[in-house]
Image (tube, coloured by chain):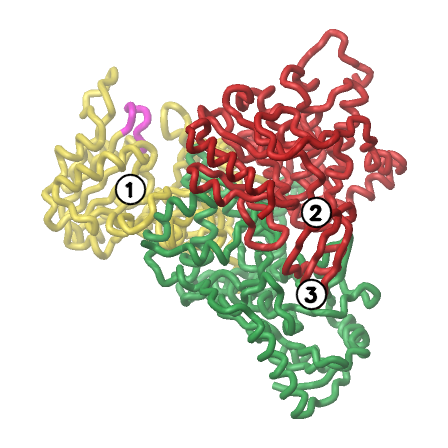
């Protein structure tokens, strides 16, 4: 696909040009927290940042209304579920390669599991309607480890366009048809061969700056029961884990959910919300029995799912993109890099 | 794109109290749309999400057999929000059914073999489905001798009592219905399921055993089958878990790398031996 | 090596090897700058892993065994010791018989979120302290800020830096400030009109994820089933509707009234930097004004909301 040039001075003009056809979201700071916000040229952050929450929320929002219905007995449609599909067409600007990759990884269980004839229509619809404009990480973060999970700071998987910062301008590499449609909304000049060469150098340099030695994939190749039985490890982590939802909710690849009904008057909604394997209620049976009653069992579930169960089910891929959010924001410093390296079945 | 969360609308055709403690009720459901009934193509062992607007969904084993067209049967224990509400619903009301979900008992593997069915308490629903399926004239010839051990705490807690009595009269199925201990008016067998299973289970050669019951029953039945020489790949258990989506996505019902809702609920003992004891 | 760390290790080692305690609750060295890693040492060898720095902000009273027979030691600043007292008063542990308090008088703990904001980056590779200064290094920057600038708000307004109960002093006592005015946040909100107040809190909690880190980091939140998790009946909606989110935070704050020591663990745990103490502070201020009570200062006086007295103030009835 094509390679174009966007002058940094034209960045807001470019984004402005998209706002007619799309809802545009971009990183901005609110009360000290950088997150994807509705695009506003005044607050747009013009440098590469890692928003506090990942792009997960655009594909699998914390609350997704799935059906509506009426309980009005006078209505012919009483008690019948009506599908409510998300309609918004969106462009998300400034996405890291790790976040974009998470969309593809979550897409495996949601829509692309060959062993499952059922596809999640909500995820697929949002995916079809969302365009991701990436911004390669020329200075990978201290807590980043995308390279150890199968990614790359300039990885293209899941992105529709990727930008490389070349100082005064971006190299705009268009990766998909969705990306081409977006790039076509603004007059961008063709890139010259040396621009592409400089961009490749930036990407190489970024990759070289990432620490070596980390092997997040190690547990995936090991015996499940052996890893499960590492009682000392799970006990130790469980002893300090708060069993809160910080890691799972900030994680781009944690996708578990609950399905609930809510009614206001006669009108009802069935919706899903994020849920977390850290919460005791997640697995609690109606009878009161809980198969994962202990904190350590729930902590084990999270790491086993990300590093063993998910790879077992989905082409050996990890359910982790190395974005580092859980590493930074876990209140008790449970560090998945360390857990992975300690997950060695004896 | 087909929405996998969309329940088929059904009408409650009949509700009956299933046990004397009134904790279980059996629902006969009829599809509002004929094409939905056709699409709901199921086999014994599978389950469905029963959907009640305003309350939510609960996963319940299908108690009817595909050989009984025209309706679905579900027997529901009153434990949580949805099931409690369901217990107050009446014939004629509209609700939803989503499925069929999960795998089936190994009906192909069972062909040409003797069948041992062991059930306890209210976990007899998908076993009822299986028995009705096996006894159907179209299928009966495919399977060998059928032995059923079914027990409950007291006579009033046995499900499907009329059918148990009918099956008892037949000569192509051996019924060992038992209650835990002597009970006024009960003239049948007494004793716990594992003890009765020990007494009546056929020699292990060429048999498939299907087991569904409370954890304590399973715990004490397994050693009986082991002792009788049943191999782990001859014994199949049906498990229960908290579930939401029903097709291996929402996360909560996994045991190791298997989802009970998608890879189960039926697992061979051989499979379970290689899975964490997290159920 | 920091003297406090050495003293904690040495003390823990002695207690464990002499069999005086089964466990020593403290912190271990974190894997990242500004990390906080609660840790329990069970053997004299484990004791060498104990750690202490200004970012050890989780409240260890939340981690120690409750309703158990274990004997254990806990590294505690003023607030942690006060929460141990609250646990004692609420029958969760026997402070006199079970617990050895290793007192670390606090000079104020630091706020990782404040550090990130002070340097304008979340990518911090090294943080070091000397005197009253904090040096922060990261991608393309090396900045020094004053301790006070990046101190946790709860520490800035803290009155009781010294453990109120202490068995072994890890470092020398410092001066408490029992009369310090700590009502700035309360005054700020009370100066607002009701509508502005509503808007203020709605904005603050609009980014709440309902991850419950605040609740789960709180030593007071030990209910077997929190009201927010009840399903029969379900008191609150579970999604991120503003009314549900606010109800959760308000009700939780009320449940902490008269028990909260303003330790700030809730704020430190929040992954999106919500200053949840705006709520708990108001209730503490009211309890102090109405009952002259501050939680966890002595082993005899029960929290006012858990006792009945004939002369209880009733002007709110």
Q: Is residue C227 visible?
A: no
Q: Is residue A282 visible?
A: yes
Of badges 3 and 1, the one in the foreground is: 3
Q: Residues within 10 Å of mark 2 (few under 14, many from 20)?
A: many
The vertical placement of C167 against B122, above or below, is above
Of badges 2 and 1, the one in the foreground is: 2
**Residue at the image point whose x is 66% and y is 45% from the top:** C54
Whole-number angstrom distance, CA of label 3 to CA of label 1: 57 Å
> Residue B88: horizontal and vertical position, in percent?
51, 31
User: Do tags 3 and 2 sit on the same chain?
Assistant: no
The vertical placement of C257 against A280, above or below, is above
Residue C22 appears in which quarter of the rendering? top left
Could you tell me which secondary element the residue under label 2 belongs to? Answer: loop
**Residue at the image point whose x is 71% and y is 56% from the top:** C135
| Tint of chain A | green
Whole-number angstrom distance, CA of label 3 to CA of label 2: 21 Å
> Residue C137: horizontal and vertical position, in percent?
68, 61
Which chain corresponds to the colour red? C
**Residue at the image point whose x is 63% and y is 50% from the top:** A68
Label of residue C111 in the image: 2
**Residue at the image point whose x is 55% and y is 48% from the top:** C29
Q: Relative to residue C249, is residue A109 drawn left or right?
A: left
Highlighted range, magenta: B152-159
Whole-number angstrom distance, CA of label 2 to CA of label 1: 60 Å
Label of residue B127 in the image: 1
Of badges 3 and 2, the one in the foreground is: 2
Q: Nearer the viewer, residue B277 or B176?
A: B277
**Which chain does the residue under circle 3 lie in?**
A
């Amino acid at each position: 696909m094509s390679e174009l040039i966007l002058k940094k001075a034209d960045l807001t003009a470019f984004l402005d040009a998209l706002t007619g056809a799309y809802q545009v979201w971009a990183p901005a700071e609110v009360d000290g927290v950088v997150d994807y916000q509705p695009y506003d040229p005044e607050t747009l952050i013009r440098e590469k940042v890692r928003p506090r929450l990942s792009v997960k929320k655009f594909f699998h929002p914390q609350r997704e209304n799935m059906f509506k219905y009426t309980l009005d007995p006078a209505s012919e449609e009483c008690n019948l579920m009506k599908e409510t599909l998300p309609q918004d067409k969106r462009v998300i600007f400034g996405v890291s390669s790790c976040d974009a990759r998470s969309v593809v990884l979550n897409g495996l269980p949601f829509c692309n599991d060959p062993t499952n004839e059922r596809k999640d229509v909500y995820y697929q619809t949002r995916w079809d309607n969302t365009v991701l404009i990436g911004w390669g990480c020329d200075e990978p973060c201290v807590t980043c480890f995308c390279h150890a999970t199968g990614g790359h700071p300039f990885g293209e998987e899941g992105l529709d366009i990727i930008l490389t910062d070349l100082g005064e301008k971006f190299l705009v590499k268009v990766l998909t048809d969705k990306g081409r449609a977006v790039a076509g909304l603004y007059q961008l000049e063709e890139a010259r061969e040396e621009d592409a060469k400089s961009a490749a150098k930036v990407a190489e340099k970024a990759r070289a700056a990432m620490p070596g030695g980390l092997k997040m994939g190690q547990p995936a190749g090991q015996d499940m029961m052996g890893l499960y039985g590492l009682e000392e490890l799970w006990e130790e982590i469980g002893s300090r884990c708060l069993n809160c939802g910080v890691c799972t909710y900030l994680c781009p690849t944690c996708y578990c959910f609950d399905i609930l009904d809510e009614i206001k008057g006669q009108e009802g909604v069935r919706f899903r919300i994020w849920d977390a394997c850290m919460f005791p209620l997640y697995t609690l049976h109606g009878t009161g029995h809980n198969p994962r009653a202990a904190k350590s069992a729930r902590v084990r579930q999270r790491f086993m799912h990300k590093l063993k169960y998910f790879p077992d089910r989905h082409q050996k891929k990890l359910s982790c993109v190395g974005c580092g959010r859980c590493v930074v924001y876990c209140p008790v410093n449970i560090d998945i890099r360390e857990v992975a390296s300690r997950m060695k079945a004896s | 794109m087909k929405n996998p969360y969309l329940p088929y609308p059904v009408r409650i055709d009949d509700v009956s109290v299933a046990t004397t403690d009134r904790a279980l009720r059996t629902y006969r459901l009829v599809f509002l749309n004929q094409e939905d009934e056709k699409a709901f193509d199921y086999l014994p062992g599978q389950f469905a999400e029963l959907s009640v607007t305003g309350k939510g969904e609960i996963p319940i084993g299908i108690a009817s057999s595909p050989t009984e067209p025209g309706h679905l049967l579900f027997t529901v224990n009153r434990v949580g929000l949805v099931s409690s509400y369901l217990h107050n619903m009446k014939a004629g009301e509209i609700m939803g059914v989503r499925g069929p979900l999960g795998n089936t008992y190994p009906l192909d593997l069972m062909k040409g073999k003797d069948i041992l069915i062991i059930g306890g308490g209210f976990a007899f629903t998908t076993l009822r489905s299986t028995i009705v399926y096996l006894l159907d004239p179209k299928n009966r010839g495919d399977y060998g001798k059928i032995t059923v051990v079914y027990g409950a705490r007291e006579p009033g807690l046995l499900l499907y009592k009329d059918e148990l009595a009918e099956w008892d009269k037949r000569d192509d199925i051996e019924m060992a219905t038992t209650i835990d201990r002597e009970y006024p008016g009960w003239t049948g067998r007494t004793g716990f399921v594992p003890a009765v299973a020990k007494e009546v289970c056929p020699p292990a050669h060429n048999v498939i055993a299907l087991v569904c019951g409370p954890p304590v029953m399973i715990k004490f039945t397994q050693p009986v089958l082991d002792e009788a020489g049943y191999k782990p790949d001859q014994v199949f258990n049906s498990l229960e878990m908290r579930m939401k989506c029903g097709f291996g996505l929402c996360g909560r019902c996994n045991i190791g790398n298997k989802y009970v809702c998608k890879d189960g609920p039926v697992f061979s003992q051989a499979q379970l031996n290689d899975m964490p004891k997290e159920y | 090596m920091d003297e406090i760390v050495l003293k904690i290790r040495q003390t823990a080692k002695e207690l464990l090897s002499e069999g005086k305690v089964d466990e020593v609750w403290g912190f271990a060295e974190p894997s990242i700058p500004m990390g906080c890693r609660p840790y329990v040492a069970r053997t004299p060898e484990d004791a060498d892993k104990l750690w202490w720095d200004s970012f050890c902000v989780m409240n260890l009273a939340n981690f120690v065994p409750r309703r158990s027979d274990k004997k254990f030691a806990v590294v505690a600043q003023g607030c942690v010791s006060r929460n141990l007292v609250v646990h004692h008063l609420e029958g969760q542990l026997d402070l006199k018989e079970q617990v050895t308090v290793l007192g670390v008088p606090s000079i104020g703990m630091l706020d990782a979120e404040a550090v990130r904001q002070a340097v304008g980056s979340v990518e911090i590779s090294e943080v070091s302290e000397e005197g009253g200064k904090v040096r922060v290094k990261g991608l393309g920057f090396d900045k020094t800020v004053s301790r006070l600038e990046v101190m946790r708000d709860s520490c800035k307004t803290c009155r009781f830096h010294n453990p109120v109960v202490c068995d072994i002093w890890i470092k020398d006592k410092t001066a408490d400030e029992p009369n310090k005015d700590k009502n700035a946040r309360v005054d700020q909100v009370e100066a607002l009109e009701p509508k502005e107040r509503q808007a203020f809190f709605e904005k603050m909690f609009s980014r709440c994820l309902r991850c419950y880190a605040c609740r789960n980091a709180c030593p007071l939140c030990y209910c077997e089933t929190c009201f927010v998790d009840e399903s029969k009946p379900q008191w609150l909606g579970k999604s991120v509707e503003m009314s549900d989110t606010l109800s959760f935070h308000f009700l939780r704050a009320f449940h902490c009234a008269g028990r909260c020591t303003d330790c700030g663990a809730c704020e430190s745990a929040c992954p999106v930097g919500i200053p949840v103490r705006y709520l708990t502070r108001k209730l503490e201020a009211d309890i102090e004004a109405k009952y002259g009570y501050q939680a966890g200062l002595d082993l005899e006086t029960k929290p006012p909301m858990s006792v009945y007295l004939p002369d209880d103030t009733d002007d709110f009835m």
